[in-house]
Image (cartoon, helix red, strand yellow):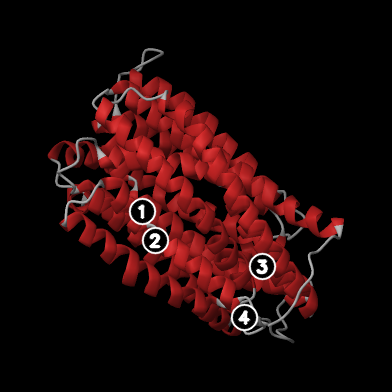
Amino acid sequence: MVHMKLIKDKNFYKMLFAICIPIALQNVITQATSIADTLMLGAADSSGALLSASSLANNPFFILSLVCFGLASGSAILSAQYWGKNDLPAIRTIISMVVKLGAAIGLIFGLIVIIFPEQVMRIFSNNEIFINAGAQYLKIIGFAYAFFAFGNTLLCALRGVEIVKISVVVNLSGLVTNIFLNWVLIFGNLGAPAMGIKGAAVATLIARLVEFTVTVVYVFGIDKKLGLRLRHLLRFNKLLAHDLVKYSTPVVINEVMWSLAISMQAVILGHIEYSSGDPVASNTIAAMIYQLASVVIFGVANAAAVVVGKAIGEKQEQQALERAHTLKLMSLLLGVLTFGIILLLRPLILGLYDLPEQTIALTHDMIFVTAVTSIFVSIASVSIVGILRGAGDTRFCLIIELVLLWGVAIPAALIAVYFRLPVPLVLALMKSDELLKAVVCLIRLHGKKWLNSVTRDKLNIAQ
């Protein structure tokens, strides 16, 4: 057992929050976009059908976004440590390789949802109204997938070298575009036709194209810190590709399996027929409140990967250990704060929705379950997404995710539905892995087994 002290150096916190705050703001903007979509679709259809359909139809995009995040996080493990060594050519090569792969995966996802929209929707629901409306949404939004995958993978990868402020500008431009076009196209304002869920899809597509454009112009034409240029997209290095596969693959599998589990949870909720309220709509609102309240948690988690990885790259092992210890304590505090914020937001958010009384009552209870879970999510996320990944301990992260999520939480939820247990209890069992992951991660972080140097010397890559 290694005894560590809490870091009191102001420079550490300045560095941490210089990365954390822009990421948190980016997540706030992303959630504001989601809130705008749900509010406008809810206003366009008081039955909640369009809200549920768009929520289910966004599951493929959710999976894609986590694949991109996994790729970028894997590359950021390497980039952060090479950043500690100030090896810019290696970082440019790593990022160039990963964004090309992300764009290719986005193209594949897009083709699938465009060509087979009804089949994709049937994975998530057996409700024909949801399927038909969701298919209309997918046929349009699928064209955004490749552009999103390239731009988002690039932005996430740049976090490893502390380039984060541009993400706020990118997402803000998307938010403004999306809200305005939602207002125009969903309701038929300014002389446009009232397109309903199709209007929401068109608005989101255009917003993604705007985000892509801003990202490409800034990163390849303006940024001086990393100096990444379009010609660097042609780069490939066997040794770095090997390392990228080695450290990224567990992260990508982790994110994919986690996203599939979240989608499986949507499938489970979408097939519950004994509930008096709509479990899909309730879960959508509960998840949205959680994501809005927990933006700082995931900002700290992403920043943690950079500050821990950078210390390892600088060969400062003791510093890495002390940073990890400090971040563990921060994660507990953030979890408790998030719990309180969610409960404070609950009546305010519920008051914005015009949904059936039974659905509102169900949502009230599901939000409470989500609030309690957030304490453990904070500890697990800062540990897994941040400290352990930043230290290259990606295989351990993958193992506990697979075992606890797919071996415990999902089966428990299925059993609960089989016995027709109350939906809030089903949700609690779905999230039971978070408590277990928090405990296991805290045990793992006692000692030094999680510390790994993932960089190479003498790569001889051209500037």
The three-letter amino acid code for the residue at tag 3 is: Arg
Which residue position is annotated with label 3? 92
Which residue position is annotated with label 2? 432
> Which numbered disc, 2 or 4, marks the residue closer to the eye?
2
Q: Residue furthest top?
A: 191
Q: Earlier in the sequence, mark 3 or mark 4?
A: 3
At 64% across and 53% down in the image, what residue appears?
333
Q: Secondary structure at mark 1?
A: helix
Q: Label 1 to label 4, Cα distance in Å?
A: 30 Å
Q: Label 1 to label 2, Cα distance in Å?
A: 6 Å
Which residue position is annotated with label 4? 450
At 23% across and 57% down in the image, what residue appears?
416
Q: Earlier in the sequence, mark 3 or mark 1?
A: 3
At 79% across and 73% down in the image, what residue appears?
319
Q: Secondary structure at mark 3?
A: helix
| Of residues 390 and 65, the one drawn nearer to the viewer in this rendering | 390
Q: Give the side of residue 249 with respect to residue 306, left or right.
A: left
The three-letter amino acid code for the residue at tag 1 is: Ala
Which residue position is annotated with label 1? 428
The three-letter amino acid code for the residue at tag 2 is: Ser
Residue 309: give x, y in percent of width and height: 69, 71
Q: Label 2 to label 3, Cα distance in Å?
A: 40 Å
Instruction: Report if residue 428 is visible in the image.
Output: yes
Residue 412: give x, y in percent of width and height: 28, 63
Residue 397: give x, y in percent of width and height: 50, 74
